[in-house]
């Protein structure tokens, strides 16, 4: 059963709210959504602008897993967003780009950010933050962006509301999370690969202390990316 969804009018960041609740001893499962974020964040400390009418939502859960195992849920989140977007636009336009960028007609339509912390007694709390451009998208970004509203299928006149999209996301995530729990990462890994064209193309890996360029060479069974360097290693 999908976790309940709480939609707030405005908040600094749904991930920050999840962190505050976790540090106060609340571990969900709970989706925390907001119609407007004033301090949304993306990977590597970037700002994630979310205008009114777009979806900003974070799942707070407890996991009796290691941080490395929990990181596999970035693939679960990508599949959930892929399924949500595909309900409103022609599915042929939707793809995934490593590791968790969901693209619509080749342009970025969402952002996913996982954060976690240790829980006294074992395990960890996990905040899975997801932003989806439902109606608008930011201009002047480093990569082309788009919104669902610009690509709707003939079955939809308008992009979904925040409330509707939030409930759909809870359902699509619940499906893939159940696959991960019952069948392990392999089922999720294969589904993700099937939706990620160009996986074996040129790739730049930005690590904490270095940047490596090479060719992506598939995904390991634990979710790690294999990168073949110029010297063949």
Image (spheres, rainbow, N blue to C red):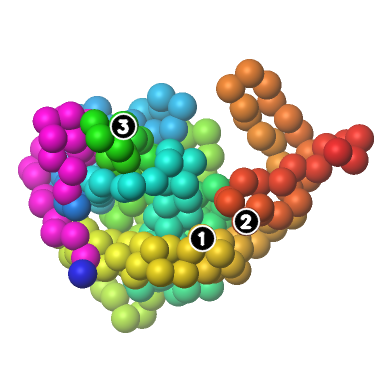
Query: Which residue is pictured at 76% across the width and 34% down the height?
Result: 213
Labels 3 and 2: the sequence-earlier one: 3
CA distance for labels 3 and 2? 25 Å
The magenta-colored residue range is 2-28
Which residue corresponds to mark 3?
Answer: 118
Q: Does the residue at mark 1 contact the one at mark 2 (Cβ under 8 Å)?
A: yes
Task: Give me the disc on residue 185.
Answer: 1
In what element is the residue under mark 3? strand
Give residue 166's position: percent from left, percent from top: 21, 59
134 horizontally vs 199: left or right: left
Q: Residue furthest front?
A: 121
Give residue 179's position: percent from left, percent from top: 41, 69
Quadrant housing the N terminus: bottom left
* Residue 80 in which image quadrant: bottom left
Task: Give me the disc on residue 227.
Answer: none
In what element is the residue under mark 2? loop
Q: Does the residue at mark 3 contact the one at mark 2 (Cβ under 8 Å)?
A: no
Query: Which residue is pictured at 65% across the width and 46% down the height?
Result: 225
Query: Which residue is pictured at 29% across the width and 75% down the height?
Result: 156
CA distance for labels 1 and 2? 7 Å
Give residue 106's position: percent from left, percent from top: 56, 56
Which residue corresponds to mark 2?
Answer: 221
């Amino acid at each position: 059963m999908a976790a309940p969804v709480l939609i707030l009018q405005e908040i600094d960041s749904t991930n920050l709210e999840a962190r505050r609740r976790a540090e106060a001893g609340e571990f969900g499962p709970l989706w925390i959504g907001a119609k407007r974020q004033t301090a949304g964040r993306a990977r590597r400390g970037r700002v994630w602008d979310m205008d009114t009418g777009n979806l900003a939502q974070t799942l707070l859960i407890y996991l009796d897993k290691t941080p490395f195992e929990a990181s596999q849920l970035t693939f679960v989140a990508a599949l959930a967003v892929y399924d949500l977007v595909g309900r409103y636009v022609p599915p042929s336009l939707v793809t995934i780009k490593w590791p968790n960028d969901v693209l619509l007609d080749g342009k970025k339509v969402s952002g996913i950010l996982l954060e976690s912390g240790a829980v006294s007694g074992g395990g960890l709390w996990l905040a899975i933050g997801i932003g989806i451009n439902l109606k608008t998208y930011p201009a002047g970004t480093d990569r082309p962006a788009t919104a669902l509203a610009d690509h709707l299928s003939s079955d939809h006149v308008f992009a979904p509301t925040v409330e509707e999209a939030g409930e759909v996301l809870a359902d699509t995530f619940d499906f893939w999370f159940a696959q991960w729990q019952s069948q392990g990462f392999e089922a999720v890994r294969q589904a993700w690969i099937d939706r990620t064209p160009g996986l074996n193309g040129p790739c730049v890996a930005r690590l904490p202390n270095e940047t490596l360029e090479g060719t992506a060479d598939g995904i390991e069974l634990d979710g790690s990316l294999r990168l073949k360097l110029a010297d063949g290693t």
